[in-house]
Image: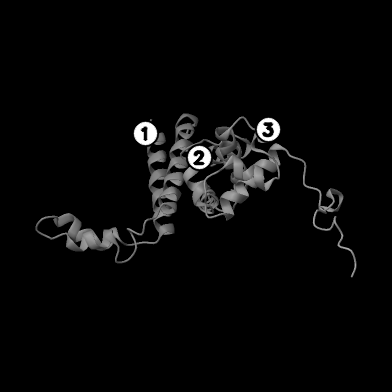
């Protein structure tokens, strides 16, 4: 019977045989953070979880990011790289397409959609989007001062719409609490709600989004033209 190898159970895989991990950098940290937010059930960011995935310690990350606030801003701006600012059509059609693309990018991750209310993207992609919106509004005849405030209003509309859908509790689903409440609204007690109950529940999410954009753009144009 051969002698038992006393080193067999204690042998470990040589580091040289392992695939080399990418050197730690700010870009690597941001990409891993966004990957986790997009694929791991929409969980909020965790420096400990990011560090574990990158085979390092949480303290190592602070050499590249100052903390969670900076990381969130970097992740949000990195995600916004997917927003398409080039399309065809009239300036209003291109603006609508840009805002829909913005909403689509944020909606890919519930955690990302919620994060827009905790941080502000101020990196190159956010600047690219804002510059494109300002250009489109200028094409539509909106003066610079009104356009400068309009980009914030449009951004809040996109963010709030996406965040609302990300936090959907099912209240607006067919047969849900909202439909049940409207069905109980009597013509005598709540005549206007009773009359409008079918319209209140009508339309798809995209139809309502496009309607909201149209209303906002009309208001922005009206404001600019009345001054």
Q: Most extreme residue toward the bottom, as rendered?
A: 1
Q: Most extreme residue toward the left, as rendered?
A: 188
Q: Residue beneath label 2, please?
A: 137
**Residue 205: image x %, image y %?**
41, 58
Q: How far apart are labels 3 and 1 at the CA level?
A: 49 Å
Question: Who comes first in sequence, dot 1 or dot 2?
Answer: 2
Horizontally, residue 134 falls left or right of residue 181, namely right
Residue depicted at 47% across the width and 29% down the height: 145
* Most foreground residue, 223 or 181: 181
SS at circle 3: loop
SS at circle 2: helix
- Residue 96 seen: no
Note whether 58 is above or below 53 in the view shown. Answer: above
Question: Who comes first in sequence, dot 3 or dot 1?
Answer: 3
**Residue 180: image x %, image y %?**
24, 63
Q: Residue beneath label 1, please?
A: 226
Q: Residue beneath label 3, please?
A: 64
Q: Most extreme residue toward the right, as rendered?
A: 2
Q: Say which of marks 3 and 2 sits in front.
A: 3
- Residue 69 seen: yes
């Amino acid at each position: 019977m051969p002698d038992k190898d006393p080193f067999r159970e204690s042998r470990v895989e040589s580091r040289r045989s392992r695939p080399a991990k990418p050197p730690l950098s700010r870009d690597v940290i941001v990409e891993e953070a966004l990957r986790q937010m997009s694929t791991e059930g929409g969980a909020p960011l965790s420096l400990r979880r990011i560090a574990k995935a990158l085979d390092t310690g949480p303290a190592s990350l602070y050499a590249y990011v100052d903390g969670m606030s900076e990381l969130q801003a970097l992740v949000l701006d990195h995600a916004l790289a997917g927003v398409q600012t080039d399309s065809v059509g009239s300036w209003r059609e291109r603006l609508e397409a840009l805002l829909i693309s913005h909403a689509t990018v944020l909606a890919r991750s519930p955690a990302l959609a919620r994060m827009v209310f905790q941080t502000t993207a101020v990196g190159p992609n956010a600047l690219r989007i804002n510059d494109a919106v300002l250009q489109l509004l200028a094409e539509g005849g909106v003066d610079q001062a009104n356009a400068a405030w309009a980009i914030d209003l449009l951004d809040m509309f996109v963010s709030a719409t996406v965040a609302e859908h990300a936090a959907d509790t099912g209240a607006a689903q067919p047969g849900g609490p909202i439909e049940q409440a409207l069905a109980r609204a009597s013509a005598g007690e709540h005549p206007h709600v009773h009359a409008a109950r079918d319209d209140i529940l009508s339309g798809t999410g995209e139809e309502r989004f496009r309607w909201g954009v149209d209303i906002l753009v009309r208001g922005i144009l009206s404001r600019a033209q009345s001054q």
